[in-house]
Amino acid sequence: MKRFAKWRLISLFAILALVLSGCGRPYLSSLRPAGEVADIQYDLMKLSTWIMVGVIIVVLIIFTIVFFRFRRKDDRIPKQVEGSHTLEIIWTVIPILLLLILAVPTVAATFKLADVKEMDKKNSKALVINVRSHLYWWDFEYPNEKIVTSQDLVVPTNEKVYFNLKSLDVKHSFWIPAVGGKLDTNTDNINRFWLVFDDKRANEAGNLFYGKCAELCGPSHALMDFKVKAMSRADFDTWVKDMQAVKQPEKAQTDLAAQGQEIFNKSCIGCHAVTPEDKPEAARLAPNLTNFGERSRIAGILDHNKEELKNWIKNPETYKPGNEMTNKYPAMTDEQLDALAEYLMGLKVQD
Amino acid sequence: MSTIAQKKGFGAVLWDYLTTVDHKKIAHLYLIAGGLFFIMGGIEAVLIRIQLAVPNNDFVSAGAFNEIITMHGTTMIFLAAMPLLFAFMNAVMPLQIGARDVAFPFVNALGFWLFFFGGLFLNLSWFLGGAPDAGWTSYASLSLHSKGHGIDFYVLGLQIAGLGTLIGGINFLVTIINMRAPGMTYMRMPLFTWTTFVASAMILFAFPPLTVGLTLMMFDRLFGANFFDVTMGGNTIIWEHLFWVFGHPEVYILILPAFGIFSEIFSTFSRKRLFGYSSMVFATVLIGFLGFMVWAHHMFTTGLGPVANAIFAVATMAIGVPTGIKIFNWLFTMWGGSVKFTTPMYYAFAFIPSFVMGGVTGVMVATAAADYQYHDTYFVVAHFHYVIVGGVVLALLAGTHYWWPKMFGTMLNETLGKITFWLFFIGFHLTFFIQHFLGLWGMPRRVFTFLPGQGLDAGNLISSVGAAFMSAGVMILLINIVVTQVKNVKVGNDPWGDGRTLEWAIASPPPYYNFKQLPLVRGLDAYWLEKMEGKKGMTPAEPIGDIHMPNSSFIPFMITLGLFIAAFGAMYHVNDKPWAIPLLIFGLAVTFGSMLVRSFKDDHGYHIHKEELTQDEKGAKA
Amino acid sequence: MQAEEKLTYETWPAAPERATLEAKNKFLGFWLFLGGETVLFSSLFATYLALKDKVPDTSQPLAKDLFELPLTLVATMLLLTSSLTSVYAMYHMKNFAFKKMMLWLGVTVLLGLGFLGLEVYEFNMYVHEGHKFTSSAFGSAFYSLVGFHGAHVTFGLGWILALMIRNYKRGLNLYNAPKFYVASLYWHFIDVVWVFIFTVVYLMGMVG
């Protein structure tokens, strides 16, 4: 808790008004949409809320009148009314009309958000990312660019980014609340959708968004976070080039790091790749670490520093119970951990 | 519970309840067993809220948390809400239609024992290696991945309990169709009976898909089948469909009887007949029908495609219309009435804004495109708790206070009742209102903890405080029950003074044969009609004669015990235990053997002779 | 009318299966139960259709490689005929002709046993061709659907036999007449389900 969240009330639109403040920091809330998809969804939320608040007000007015006017005061027997056709028609027809008002934009938006025709076109220029979810980590493959990264999704702003979603173990769900609603990563099939990351609003969030797993997937479901780095198309292209340029694992810069690399090559490389090459997805057993030094979190949840990294390697089970890394490698001494941390933190592709 | 029972020894009472086929005693059993499971589910809920009170809490471990949420949901739906509703259906519905018992008293007892042993089996998981941990929806890929026997307990326990619910539903349907008193036409049936009828019909069609789903899961986990194993050609989406084809109607199976309870209470304490009775019946049937057309709205993010999502979105919205009709009919039942604010009426009155809130968020989550944001977040958690707590649980509490005198012959204390109400009502809104926002702020559901600094801290703390209020309310209710039963002040036929339906025309609690003479029903609110004409009771439809009664039986218990034993055999057979398969066979032999005994031993019941009936009456007066 | 009454041909009612309140309840309750069973089998059919021919590798046989018309056609004829003989049995039950009823029920049981025997033979054959319950999703779905039906046949046979043995010496009365009737209703239901299995699983399976 470095900074306390401040609350502020925007407008009379009380139901949706409580929004977290704090500019220049990444945020989670779906009530501060930062892209076209989230905008559409936010508009639908507002429309439905307005209609529903109207319904609630009507009910509450009748409710209040009943409460004050018709309390029992004497022993009289009220008139036994059977019903009223006029009234009953009114409260059947009006809700139908209200629902129609809501149904039309809902159907339109549902089709719009599912429109991935661009992905099927030949020679399409659209950016496609294959998201593969695993027990508590995320794998991101850029098939056209032929690079792979993990945990930190890197995307260009102000353009449609298309996603192919699939899970390789149990079902998860891919969700970036501020940018758009979620879609499940099934084990059976590939689900497809698109998102847009708005440049201006990404800037307000420090170009970083929180992503979550939204489908219960085991003990560490709550900890299956990822980050989204949104950058301009030019920056993104540079990043892609830098990644593509890594053909060999990055050379260790210091002696300590060189020791670390040796340990890594002995104990870790069986699962973790340090080049962004395009291996088949089934062979990508653990997060790709090519640009690990540039990540924002360790394992998606811990602060990005050497101390936390050593803690994580020492005992991942404490931080992410049920993860697939525990016991897959020999125990390490403190010296080995120092070396390993030095090496991993030096894995950077950009200057 | 009754005075007669207290004179008997404990052993005799126990044997009486183990073998009873009397719908009123079975109602007691459902109430007690359902109440115990409700408390267990409540404790699990409190553990959840303690864990989530502050970020990065380690009150329970991640694995244990998943077990707790799974058992909380499963227990509350299958072992608390449904049985408690069954308690009222059993206690009241036969009286409301002027019947001496349900159509199949033996099956009624069997249904209870199946539910009870199923629930017991499920809860034994806590002591035998860990509870199920894949959520109450138990999605297939995670369930197959889950180690230990937790999911097996879920699959087998729910199969047993579900069977009990299914035959209970058939029993109620036949009772309502065949056993109504003379003059009790369909359109004169009290609304609680109507909702019982529609809910039972839904049980009949909704539970088989669940049974199939559970069976397939059992085959996969215990007998090497591959329904949900993708590498062997399986498909996990099948589970989602089967589960929700059951799961969505299940929500209406719970809420419709709750509507029925509130309809009775509104009408009684407003001293007015239900406004728009026929449209209420129509709306009930329509909700029941539409309830089967909307299951895929639970799967908007599964990737079924825009066509399916759009169709299911619109169909779901349509349910808002009959539900709205009901809300306005209740309001206008009170309009122009003479409303007395008793404890049951407190609950009924508070139910309206609470349920409307749950209803409108229901329409919000039905908007498919926006649901991509709501789905699997705390917004959905808030929504369904507003429906199930704000609707069903408030109805159960209201029904408990309303029908307690009819079931046990004593009145629960009104002051304590109102304290319970305020604690529970405030606690409920405190707990769940803020959860709408937690969801919108990006908190997924079923997370065992959350990180500080993401704006979720304050909301979660508020929510946890609310849970404490609700627990306090339930504790006061328990105290109220104990105090009332210890004082044991007996009340007459119609203790509320405003009773309208047939159950208030006979003694509290009713004699074991219910009606000495079947009543003649002359219209809706049959007892009220007679009262308004200055009569003391119902006009009999038959002369006093012999009454045919069913015999008590221990066989329902034995049939169920066999399945209970067999379930252990099925479960431990994967561990290569040599005794597992013999145990499975032994258990099934006990079940089928008991059925055979039932079939071979003629059971014609017995007759109460009319001399005894007249003596009873004299005895009661003396 | 009382269930225990001794009746004669003259006093035997036209619809003995619904003559008492208990019988009426049983009659209606069983129809409703069959409604639930219909949903149960529908779910299994849906599962089967979703998983038909879903196998992990090409070495596994598919529906078109497995099913043979002659065998299933004979099985179908046996079961259809048994449905007809149970109709005869109920006809005699309504006419208070106990012995004839028992005779036709006996024929029904024999035909049912014949069907079961063929099914066991058939399953055994498939297993030898590599189509097992555990070998693929297709196998699991096939044996669950058809096997579930087979279990129903077995239960139905046990039920009818139990009724025959229990009432062998007593003849018909209003207590056991509804039991016989309901058992035959169950038998018809099994038969109807088989017609769907024959169409959906076998005929549609053979065309591919």
Image (spheres, coloured by chain):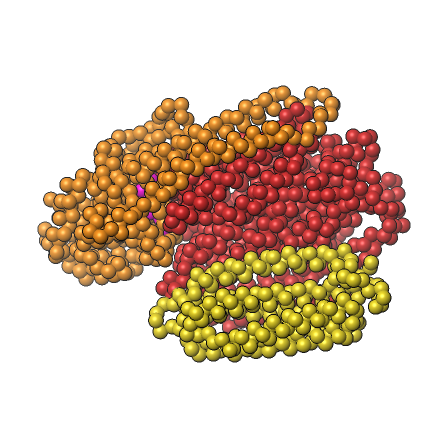
Chain colours: A orange, B red, C yellow
**Residue drawn at 60 percent across, 24 percent down:** A67
Tell whether position C183 is magenta.
Answer: no
Q: Quadrant of the N terminus of chain A?
A: top left
In front: B59, or B406? B406
- Tell me where the magenta segment starts and ends, as one range: A172-178
Which secondary structure type mostly characterizes the magenta part of the structure? strand
x%, y% of residue B620?
A: 85, 42
The location of residue B319, given as percent across then percent down, is 52, 40
**Residue A132 left/right relative to B265:** left
B443 lies left or right of A200: right
Residue B322 x %, y %: 56, 37
Q: Residue at x 78, y 62 (%)?
A: C14
Does B338 sit left or right of A336 as displayed? Answer: right
| Residue that sits furthest to the front in the current view | C207
Q: Quadrant of residue A29?
A: top left
Give the image quarter of residue A247.
bottom left
- Tell me if B541 is positioned left or right of B567 in this view: right
Residue C115 is situated, as x and y percent measured from the top left of the image, at 58, 75
Residue plotted at (44% across, 79% down): C128
Name the image quarter holding the C terminus of chain A. Answer: top left
Please tell me which residue lies in front, B548 or A219.
Answer: B548
